[in-house]
Image (spheres, rainbow, N blue to C red):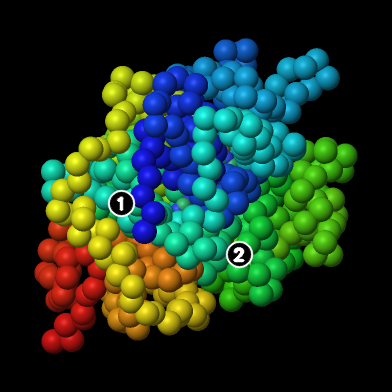
Amino acid sequence: MKYSKYSAIIIGSGIAGLYAALKIEQQTRLSDGILLITKSKLGESNSRYAQGGMVGVLKENKSDSTASHISDTIKAGAGLSELNTVKFISENSDKVIKDLLNFGVEFDRDNNNQFTFTLEAAHSVRRVLHSGGDATGRMIEEALAKKVYENQNIDIYEETVAVELLVNMANECKGVIVFNDITKEYEVIYSSAIILATGGIGQLFKYTTNPIGATGDGMALAFNAGAMMQDMEFVQFHPTALAIDGDENRFLISEAVRGEGAKLVDSDGIEFMYKYHEKKELAPRDIVTRANYTEMLNHSVDNVYLNAACIDKNKLAERFPNISKKCLENGIDISKDFIPVAPAAHYMMGGIKTDIEGETSISGLYAIGETASTGLHGGNRLASNSLLECVVCAFEVANYLKTLELKPPKQIDESIKNIIEKYSDEIYLEEIDVSGMKKKLQNIMWNGAGIFRNEENLKNSLKDVEQLRLNFHRSDKCISKSEYEFRNMLTVAEMVIISALKRKESRGAHYRTDYLQTDEVGHHSFLTRTSMADIKKSMNIECSNESVIYRINNN
Ligand code: FAD
Ligand code: SIN
């Protein structure tokens, strides 16, 4: 086992992780250096696929104001957004976006060199900045990744998976154990500032817009280490993913296409959104998703359609070059053909509970971006607020770390030694092909904990997940990245299902067909390893070990 130490470790190289690394390096003198760890290539992430854009409440946009953005975010959030967090993020938007420009990020501009803003659902004005037309995520990510590569003070580990956090009995995080998926070697890395920027969980569901790495690793690691989780039932499903047969990792058809005027229609070209909401195609995302899904169920079809032919042909090509290209590759000319679309898991509103500086309930452990739950998004995220949250929170965690003396720990207690031992053991394990089990899990979650939920289906899903866990035969140590990802997916699946069972109301993206009402007062849900064990016991599911192995009591 190799040992090393760093002043700060960032895990994840999406926009949150890349920007945090650059800001920490810029703001803080760190004697033991900065390490950025990522489980595939630098920049491979959900961030890379972001299309619509990033909210920019910019001073020069005279039709917009922070008051208006705050109000839209709170309305979309279905009574669960934290006002102070929303306010802070909105008010810091101008500052961080101008700062991004200093790192080589560009947003699309008009002929007068002024930023162009698009409209997305539930925004009352045009305030969404975009880049490369519909390639916003890739453009930002590539600019930041270039700066990280060039920066001599940031070490990078690629193809390296964080597998367990080193949290001691005093609830302090002292480092992380990582696994190199190429060399199959483990390394213990000590640090007193570990920043999780590990992204979302879309891969838990059969249909998703998320790439294969979105397996909720950071959430599982933090939860297993004892961190407080928040609102884990709130999974956002995007209404319009390209529905091509056999393609379950679905390409997104951005909400901005509807923002520019496209209409949702059935196979006969008849519009239906007027039945569901006065804002029709621009209603909050959860409402459009349920409308599409209801139409699909009522007519026993696999998709509805988006009609973008009403948008000027040249504008379509200029604003949505990648969407046009992808559709054309599939024989769809979006300037005249209907685009087949269906809902898909897209974004996780819940996650590791943090404040705006990324502080979690474990000292020395921080979380930013999609893996964190700051309370900004409430029960339903407003489009394009995620990238903004990533950069504001990355900025703030760097600012906060500036106030601390970051020294890697000198002494390691018994509890941490025990964690390290689990990975030092030279036990022979045969690699498990997890692809079949992963498919099963994705089906379980889509059918039982997806867009429409009820108690019976959620309970059955939990039992099915437990059975998969028994079949998986791994608790801590695994022998490949895909095994580690599957281990983490099982943990996150349980968190989502149990939180969904506990919330006996419908709110935002969490829709219970057996509890249609929305409670008068919104409340967050919280989950820890200990509280989950208690809940499972009360549900007749026995825990044979507090962290990962459970057995279903059939009585
Ligand atoms: P990610 O970008 O997902 O990065 C996570 C990183 O962590 C990756 O590098 C991953 O490899 C790494 N990682 C994970 N686990 C481990 C581990 N165990 N060890 C080491 N590394 C690990 N939001 C908007 O605001 N506007 C949009 O227009 C928009 N469009 C979207 C379109 C699509 C198709 C998708 C999927 C999402 C979109 N979103 C959008 C949401 C937004 O892109 C994400 O929420 C955001 O980019 C998350 O950034 P992040 O840095 O937190 O995580
Ligand atoms: C989209 O472009 O529709 C996605 C925007 C988002 O998820 O914020």
Tell me where residue 39 appears, x and y as whole percent.
51, 54
Tell me where residue 331 appears, x and y as whole percent.
84, 64
Q: Is residue 490 left or right of residue 224?
A: right
What residue occupies the far bottom of the structure in this picture?
Answer: 555
Q: Is residue 175 left or right of residue 442?
A: left
Q: Earlier in the sequence, mark 2 or mark 1?
A: 1
User: Rounded to the nearest whole Å, what is the CA distance between mark 2 and mark 1?
Assistant: 30 Å
Q: Is residue 237 left or right of residue 318?
A: left
Q: Is residue 428 left or right of residue 330?
A: left
Task: Identify the residue at image location x=52%, y=63%.
Answer: 183
Tell me where residue 357 appears, x and y as whole percent.
34, 29
Amino acid bearing label 1: Leu
What residue occupies the far right of the structure in this picture?
Answer: 314
Task: Identify the residue at image location x=88%, y=39%.
Answer: 314
Residue under numbered circle 2: 249
Amino acid bearing label 2: Asn
> Observer-nearest residue: 150 or 548?
150
> Observer-nearest residue: 538 or 430?
430
Residue under numbered circle 1: 165
Task: Identify the residue at image location x=30%, y=51%.
Answer: 165
